[in-house]
Amino acid sequence: MRVRIARDLCVGAGQCERSAPDVFAQDDSGLGHALTESPAAERWPSVHEAASLCPVRAVLVTADPDTRHDPWETP
């Protein structure tokens, strides 16, 4: 699985960092980012919690790290 944050959606609520501080952080502008795109399996429950708590659904979780088409990316 792969995780990242859609920075064009992020509003800096910080729910991701509170749910999984070893996977997410906020940068100097207050926006979230993933510290790793492929967290260890034991971190996935907190990653899914972060995704469900994000008020704008900016935490993106994909099942296949080799996906060539990501609907959240602009071409």
Image (cartoon, rainbow, N blue to C red):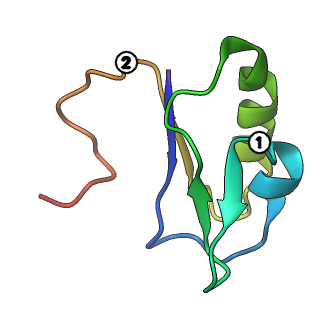
- According to the picture, the residue beneath numbered tag 1 turns out to be 22
Q: Which residue is mark 2?
A: 64
Q: Nearer the viewer, mark 1 or mark 2?
A: 1
Q: Residues within 10 Å of mark 1 (few under 14, many from 20)?
A: some
The residue positioned 68% from the left and 13% from the top of the image is 41
**Disc 2 on helix, strand or loop?**
loop
| Residue at the top extreme, as displayed | 41
Specify whether 42 is left or right of 61. Answer: right
Rendered location of residue 55, percent (x, y): 73, 63
Residue 11's quadrant in the figure? bottom right
Q: Nearer the viewer, residue 63 or 20?
A: 20
Category of crowding for the residue at label 2, using alpha-carbon neighbours closer than 10 angstroms: few (below 14), some (14–19), many (at least 20):
few
Circle 1 — which element?
loop
When asked about the image quadrant of residue 63, the answer is: top left
Point out residue 2 in the picture as x, y percentages from the top left corner: 47, 29
Q: Position of residue 25 (x, y in %)?
A: 70, 60
